[in-house]
Image (tube, rainbow, N blue to C red):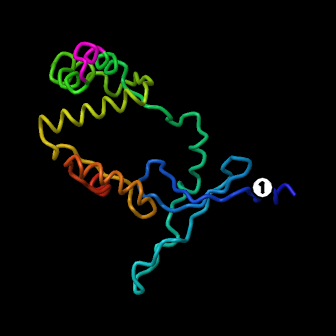
């Protein structure tokens, strides 16, 4: 009975895992009492061509064991920033009032810039709000576009294999601001 109960589940949900991977491989997540109990690779990728081998099964052993990450106490669930940078950002924002002007002022001052750059690699991260994080990121993007042009911003989104919404929204955003779109292969290859 114990063994059989182990394999009983309340529901199955399509999912993917994103633990240091942009592959977005298709998985089924089996849930019992609101807890993920195991994962399995899905066999739902279309055949690219009758003469080509199928992608099935697509997914790695790490993906099959990724549910530990959901419940890990080490999982990052909030934005974090270096404390030094946050203090300098808040000070600049209080002085300037406008987030873009505050960011420009902060990054163009060699002394303040050195303060937050020299602590890189030494930890010191602190939690801050989603609103502050979004404001800081938006200010940095606008400043970069104004000062250097939109082609100085580049990014990539999840692969479209099983995440068309994620792929389309990221691609649309980068396209609308005039940024360069690269693939994740550009990051992983030499």
In the image, which residues are magenta? 91-98
Whether residue 150 is situated above or below residue 81 in the rendered picture: below
Residue 166 horizontal/vertical position (percent): 40, 54
Residue 149 horizontal/vertical position (percent): 13, 42
Q: Quadrant of residue 70?
A: top right
Q: Main secondary structure of the magenta part?
A: helix
Mark 1 is surrounded, within 10 Å at the Cα level, by few (under 14), some (14 to 19) or many (20 or more) other residues, namely few
Whether residue 34 is situated above or below residue 8 in the rendered picture: above
Total marks placed: 1
Q: Among all residues in the image, which is located at the extreme bottom?
A: 51
Q: Residue at x 53, y 71 (%)?
A: 44
Task: Check disc 1 and report its element: helix, strand or loop.
Answer: helix
Q: Is residue 20 magenta?
A: no
Horizontally, residue 77 falls left or right of residue 170, namely right
Whether residue 186 is situated above or below residue 99 in the rendered picture: below
Q: Nearer the viewer, residue 135 or 184?
A: 135
Q: Nearer the viewer, residue 97 or 64?
A: 97
Quadrant into which the N terminus falls: bottom right
Q: Among all residues in the image, which is located at the extreme right?
A: 1
Quadrant into which the C terminus falls: bottom left
> Which residue lies under the disc numbered 1?
6
Q: Quadrant of residue 92?
A: top left
Residue 48 horizontal/vertical position (percent): 40, 78
Q: Residue at x 69, y 57 (%)?
A: 11
Q: Among all residues in the image, which is located at the extreme left?
A: 148
Horizontally, residue 51 falls left or right of residue 145, namely right
Residue 38 horizontal/vertical position (percent): 66, 55
Q: Is residue 93 magenta?
A: yes
């Amino acid at each position: 009975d114990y063994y059989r109960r182990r394999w009983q589940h309340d529901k199955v949900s399509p999912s993917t895992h994103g633990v240091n991977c942009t592959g977005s491989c298709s998985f089924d997540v089996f849930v019992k009492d609101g807890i993920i109990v195991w994962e399995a690779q899905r066999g739902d990728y279309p055949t690219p061509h009758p003469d080509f081998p199928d992608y099935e099964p697509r997914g790695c052993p790490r993906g099959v064991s990724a549910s530990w990450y959901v419940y890990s106490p080490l999982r990052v669930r909030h934005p974090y920033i270096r404390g030094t940078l946050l203090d300098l950002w808040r000070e600049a924002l209080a002085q300037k009032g406008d987030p873009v002007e505050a960011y420009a002022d902060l990054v163009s001052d060699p002394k303040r810039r050195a303060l937050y750059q020299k602590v890189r690699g030494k930890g010191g991260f602190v939690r801050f709000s989603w609103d502050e994080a979004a404001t800081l990121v938006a200010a940095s993007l606008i400043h970069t576009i104004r000062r250097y042009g939109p082609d100085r911003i580049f990014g990539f989104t999840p692969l479209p294999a099983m995440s068309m919404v994620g792929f389309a929204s990221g691609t649309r955003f980068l396209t609308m601001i005039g940024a360069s779109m690269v693939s994740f292969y550009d990051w992983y290859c030499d």
